[in-house]
Amino acid sequence: MTLRSFDDVGRDDEIPPVVRVVTAEDVKAYADAGGDHNPLHQDDAVARAAGFPGVIAHGMFTMGHMAAAVVRWAGDPAAILAISAQFREPVFIGERIEAGGRVRNVDPVTRTVTLGTWVSLERDGQTRWPVKKGEATVRLR
């Protein structure tokens, strides 16, 4: 992993998108690691009874994918000082999610960068935003 240099970053720079297809194994592994065994994340019948077409991924799983895009861009997980997200859409098993972002602010005094981040997917011919207004603060060398 290459560490990103503060001097090579400018306002409006894009974070290269990171793509993955959400699998049942991903969701189960996340539930096991985090201890969140809500049946909405494990049982299709329960998820359908709640009005979903099937099992939904944890919101924090989706945010974790967004964080992975930031880490890949920064080159060091320790560079992330803060990260947040607004959850707007559920993510279902088999969907292809894409995480990315853009540099919104560069602070030369603190050598920090503020990123606007997001997670998108295509469903029913429309772009959906499971995370539309994410943000990350990153300190670069």
Image (cartoon, grey):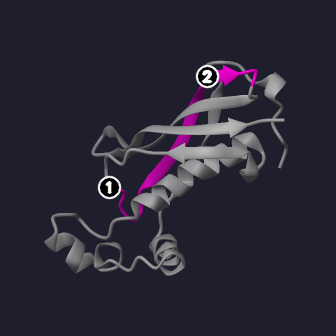
| Amino acid type, mark 1 | Pro
- Res. 101 image quadrant: top right
Kind of residue at disc 2 = Asn
**Label 1: which secondary element:** loop
The front one of 111 and 133 is: 111
Q: Position of residue 94 (x, y in %)?
A: 42, 62
Magenta segment: 91-109
Residue 20 visible in this rendered orientation of the protein: no
Task: Where is residue 60? Give x, y as percent.
Answer: 46, 60
Judge from the rendering whether residue 42 lies leftward or rightward of residue 60; answer left or right: left
Q: CA distance from mark 1 to mark 2?
A: 29 Å
Name the residue at 49% across, 53% down. 63
Give the labeled residue for mark 2: 105
Q: Which mark is residue 106?
A: none
* Relative image position of residue 58 (x, y in whole percent): 40, 64
Main SS class of the magenta portion in the image: strand
Q: What residue did someone put label 1 on? A: 90
In this picture, residue 141 sits left or right of residue 13? right
**SS assignment at label 2:** strand
